[in-house]
Amino acid sequence: MEPKTGDAFGLMLQAHLDGKTAWELVERDDGFLSGGSVERYFSAPPEWTAFERAMLDRLDGPTLDIGTGAGRFALALQERGVPVTGLDTSPAAIRVCAARGVRETVCASVHRHAVDAAGAYERFLLAGNNLGLLGSAEAAPGFLAVLAAMAAPGAIVVAQGSGPYDTDDPAHLAYHERNRSRDRMAGQLRIRVRHRQFATGWFDYLFLTPDELTGLLRDTYWTLSEVDDSEPPAYVAVLRRR
Ligand SMILES: C[S@@+](CC[C@H](N)C(=O)[O-])C[C@H]1O[C@@H](n2cnc3c(N)ncnc32)[C@H](O)[C@@H]1O
């Protein structure tokens, strides 16, 4: 039997908050299943890598935390007195954020939120691999145009991404090949998150190198101004509005 379509990621966060055992289960459309700890979504800066703490230091103005999850960055920013809005498409994730004390939350896509937030933010955060929310070469320009519409003068995007090529796992290499044969970027994952009997809908999550990112930015309002690649294969990209 197929899983029920539902808010699997948020329900997984809620289960962890309620003290139940939960794992982050991600299913790729070739059947590859990976599991990870949920604990990290609830962690505080002293438990983060230096790389993530350096991201936090760049967020020194009104910030939109896109795909906030359980709100770990939003809470850390609030503690520093930085105005922050935690945005997520998952209603349960937003309830978890509110329960943990995130004061300003929005349950919406960036496209929907932009209608109410023209010019509102100086900083956009895509933490925890959320540069992947660019989705695909086709979707990325639209996503970035919406951020530009919400950008105050001097705005930057601080985004953590991962390159797809630092692997010799035959399953991943075959997946890259399968993607290329379908005119998709090699690291364009089609995935869904599972929790108990629920699964999110399938969505594209993009793993790409800084060079590939530069290519995608060509006809957008954003330019790649800095890359911190001190913890490969992850990196932090800073984009500046042209
Ligand atoms: C990998 S988690 C990262 C959570 C958080 N940024 C962190 O670092 O702890 C991805 C989050 O993005 C949210 N998400 C997925 N697609 C989204 C979209 N299109 N717009 C906004 N949020 C989205 C998910 O619900 C989830 O909470």
Image (tube, helix red, strand yellow):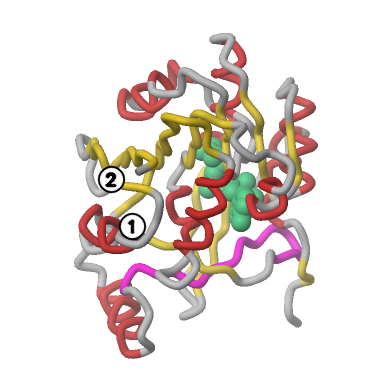
Residue under pointer 2: 224
193 part of magenta stretch: yes
Nearer to me, 29 or 235:
235
Q: Count neighbours of disc 1 (C-alpha within 10 A) and say few if under 14, some if 14 to 19, many if 20 or more.
A: some
For label 1, being within 8 Å of ligand 1 is answered no
- The amino acid beneath tag 1 is Leu
Q: How many marks?
A: 2
Question: Disc 1 and disc 2: Cα gap in Å?
Answer: 8 Å
43 part of magenta stretch: no
In the picture, measured across the screen, residue 104 lies left or right of residue 54, that is right
Q: Count neighbours of disc 2 (C-alpha within 10 A) and say few if under 14, some if 14 to 19, many if 20 or more.
A: many
Residue at horizontal 28 percent and vertical 83 percent from the top? 177
Circle 2 — which element? strand
The correct choice, above or below, for 201 with respect to 127 in the image is below
The correct choice, above or below, for 54 with respect to 210 in the image is above
Nearer to me, 235 or 28:
235
**Quadrant for the N terminus in the image:** bottom right
In the picture, measured across the screen, residue 121 lies left or right of residue 144, that is right
The residue stretch that appears in magenta = 186-199
Residue at horizontal 61 percent and vertical 15 percent from the top? 78
Residue at horizontal 25 percent and vertical 69 percent from the top? 169
- The amino acid beneath tag 2 is Leu
Query: Residue 240's spot in the image, x, y percent?
Result: 35, 39
The correct choice, above or below, for 11 with respect to 141 in the image is above
Query: Residue 144's spot in the image, x, y percent?
Result: 48, 53
Dot label at residue 217: 1
Query: Residue 107's spot in the image, x, y percent?
Result: 76, 45
Residue at horizontal 68 percent and vertical 42 percent from the top? 13
Tags 1 and 2 in contact by the CB under 8 Å rule? Answer: yes
Nearer to me, 168 or 109:
109
